[in-house]
Image (cartoon, grey):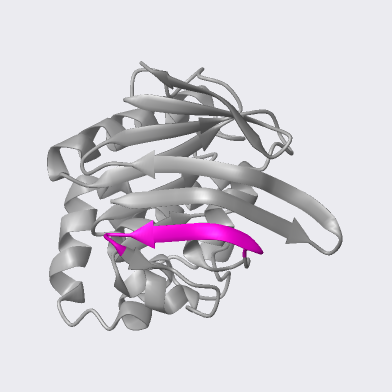
Amino acid sequence: MLTIKKLNVSIGKINILRDISIEVHNRKFIGLIGRNGAGKTTLMKTIIGLLSHQGGSIYFENQVLNKTMQPFLRARLGIGYMPEDRRLIPDLSVEENILINAWATQNTRFREKLNYIYNMIPEVQEFSNRKALFLSGGQQKLVSLARALMGGSKLLLLDEPFEGVAPALAQRLVELIINLKKTGISVMLSESDLTHSEKILDYIYMIDRGEIIQPKTL
């Protein structure tokens, strides 16, 4: 499904990712594990098109994701992205934040998908009319996941989904992500260690200082 070959990414004059090669197969959950600053977020932003790569290739379902392909076009291919810092629009309601992906991807069946998301994450429906500004950090994480699901019909990129949340919510996120296995979607998930994700993942890539150092099957 997703194939990355010898990817190199620089920000300014600083080389962040060096010769990264990764594969995410259909229906598989892979982990990108490494300390803060290892390059996990940079890789996900490059896949979704928020950053450009200077070398190497990214393929999604045998289609090249070249440097000129905008993020909304990648989202239309079925790639959803949950950023570590959530990135909700504070003055929009929860439901409006979720529907942003539907507008960007021109999903005409958005109401059906929204109901599917509410069934999967019913607590989000409970505060769907509330402005994102008034949500707790944990609630914002759930909304960010819901927004990623609205666009991510084939592949989800989940950047540090458990970072900064209470243990009970972290466990709830684990349950939700495990339930995604039933849907046939593929997932790339990043975490600083395997505290929450070990039971979720099929395969991990250890990343350090912008390089893959240890692929491993779980």
Residue 218 drawn at (x, y percent): 35, 16
Q: In the shown orientation, is residue 128 left or right of residue 144? A: left
Q: Residue at x 48, y 73 (%)?
A: 71
Number of callouts in the render?
A: 0
Q: Main secondary structure of the magenta part?
A: strand
Q: Say whether residue 158 is visible.
A: yes
Above or below: residue 72 compared with residue 126: below
Magenta range? 53-62
Asked if the stretch drawn in magenta spans residue 57, the answer is yes
Residue 124 drawn at (x, y percent): 33, 53
Above or below: residue 163 compared with residue 171: below
Q: Residue at x 42, y 55 (%)?
A: 143
Q: In the shown orientation, is residue 33 left or right of residue 62? A: right
Q: Nearer the viewer, residue 141 or 65?
A: 65
Above or below: residue 213 compared with residue 68: above
Asked if the stretch drawn in magenta spans residue 9, the answer is no
Location of residue 115 (image quadrant)? bottom left
Q: In the shown orientation, is residue 11 left or right of residue 58? A: right
Name the residue at the right extreme.
13
